Image: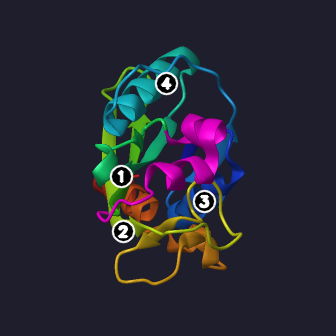
Amino acid sequence: MKIFFATHNPGKVREFKKILDGIADVEQINLEYDEIQSDNPEEVAKDAAKKLAEKYGKPIVVEDSGLFIDSLNGFPGVHSAPIHKQIGLKGILKLMEGVSDRGCEYRSAVGYCESGKKAVTFLGTEKGTISREARGTHGFGHDSIFMPEGSGKTYGETANVEDAKKFRRKAVEKLVEWLKEKGC
C-alpha cells in the first residue's frame, strides 16, 4: 500500500517512514491547500486529508501538531509554526517570564483519507514543561524549550530527537493499528 504524506517537512517524513515500515510505503508530496481556521489539530488534519484525497484521488496522510502551554491558555497551539517564525523561542520564553506553571502538552493529529471515503484522525499527546532557557540544537520549532515529563532534558538536547517525540509516534501508531484492522 502506498500513502502520500502531504508535508514540506522531511523530518516528519523520516519519522512516518520508520513507524510505517512494512505496513505502507510513504511518499512525500508537497501539496498546497487552504487550511481551516480551528484551534483543534484533529479538525485541521481531518479537513486537510479529506480535501486532498478528493482533489488528488490518492490515500493522503496529513499531520498537524502544536505546543499547548497551560498558563497561556493553550497558546501557541495549532499556530505553533507561524508563531515560532514570528516571535521565536525568545518570544515564548519572554511570555513565560515570572510564570511558575510551566506545564504544557504537545499534540499531534494524524488525518488519513482515501478518495470517496470518510476521513479519520488519530491523536497523540505528550505532557511536559517549558524550560527556562533554550537548550540543545537538535530538532526544530519548540524542541529546545520542551522537556518531556520525567526528563530533565529538552528535545533539543536529545541526539535522536525524531525517535524521542512520543506524541507524534503515538498518533502514527494508532494509524498503523487502524490500517492493520482494515487489512492493509
Which disc number belongs to residue 128?
Answer: 2
Report which quarter residue 14 is drawn in: bottom right
Q: What is the spatial separation of the Cα atoms under label 3 and label 4, in whole angstroms?
A: 20 Å
Residue where numbered disc 4 is placed = 53
Q: Most prominent secondary structure in the magenta stretch?
A: helix
Q: Secondary structure at mark 3?
A: helix
Label 3 amino acid?
Lys
Provide the secondary structure element on which disc 1 rests: strand
Structural crowding at the residue carrying mark 4, measured as other residues with C-alpha within 10 Å and reported as few (<14), some (14–19) or many (≥20): many
Viewer-nearest of discs 2 and 3: 2
Q: Are marks 2 and 1 in contact (CB under 8 Å)?
A: no
Residue at 63% x, 47% y is: 88
Residue 18, quarter of the rendered image:
bottom right
Q: Earlier in the sequence, mark 3 or mark 4?
A: 3
Question: In the image, what residue occupies the spot 34% across and 58% down?
Answer: 105
Residue holding disc 3: 17
Q: Amino acid at mark 1?
A: Ile
Residue at the front extreme of this rendering? 98
Residue 113, image x, y percentages:
41, 32
Mark 1 nearby-residue class (10 Å; few <14, some 14–19, many ≥20): many
Magenta-colored span: 80-101
Task: Name the N-terminal-most of marks 4 and 2.
Answer: 4
Relative placement, left or right, of 77 versus 40 is right
